[in-house]
Amino acid sequence: MSKRYAKLGPGEGPNYDWENDHTFVKVSGQDTDGAYTLMEDNLKASFALGLHRHDTHAETFYFLDGAVDFYVDGDWHQCTAGTTMHVPPGVPHACRVAEGKPAKMLMIFQPSGFDGFLAELAKMNEADFADETKMNALNARYDIIPMGPVPPHPDDKR
């Protein structure tokens, strides 16, 4: 008889170790019949994610360690351990690690799909990443609408 539950320990689950972060899929869209995906994201000191939005899915972030400067709908917030940030569909957002130090967060994507995006990215080579048509199609398939770089942070003017 197969198990009706799933358990993953630290460092377990499909994972993607990129230049700027190391992400673990803890609960996949396949596990939830597409309802949501839960991921652990270990942000490296160089992590920054440009301004973007999702028109059909929400994202919820729960911060576990470190600090992340999070830009949402025109406002900057510093999110530290214990903070939750929920971003509904259609709301522009971006983020970067604060103070150039690593951070860790859980991410819930509802409905699921981002795990599929990462799986496809992992199969790509540099030529694929440079192919604007291919990247536009991939972003469109996973409801990722790029809107530009990380907006200027008020602390950058000091």
Image: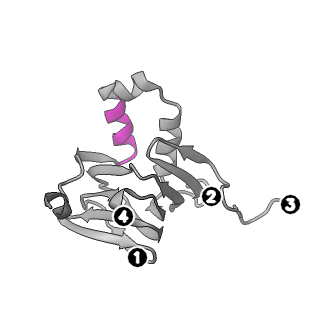
Q: Which of pointers 1 and 4 lies earlier in the amino acid sequence?
A: 4
Viewer-side residue, 23 vs 145: 23
Amino acid residing under circle 1: Thr
Residue depicted at 45% across the width and 58% down the height = 102
Does the magenta run of residues contain 142?
A: yes
Q: CA distance from mark 3 to mark 1?
A: 40 Å
Residue depicted at 31% across the width and 70% down the height = 78
Q: Position of residue 101 (x, y in %)?
A: 41, 58
Q: How many marks?
A: 4
Does the magenta run of residues contain 18?
A: no
The kind of secondary structure element at disc 2 is loop
Q: Position of residue 8 (x, y in %)?
A: 69, 61
Q: Quadrant of the C terminus?
A: bottom left
Mark 1 sits on what residue?
Answer: 83
Mark 4 sits on what residue?
Answer: 68
Q: Position of residue 116 (x, y in %)?
A: 51, 45
Q: CA distance from mark 3 to mark 4?
A: 43 Å
Amino acid residing under circle 4: Val
Residue 27 visible somewhere in the drawing: no
The kind of secondary structure element at disc 1 is loop
Q: Is residue 132 left or right of residue 83?
A: left
Which numbered disc, 1 or 4, marks the residue closer to the eye?
Answer: 4
- State yes or no: discs 3 and 2 in contact (Cβ < 8 Å): no
Mark 2 sits on what residue?
Answer: 31
Callout 3 crowding tier (Cα within 10 Å): few <14, some 14–19, many ≥20: few
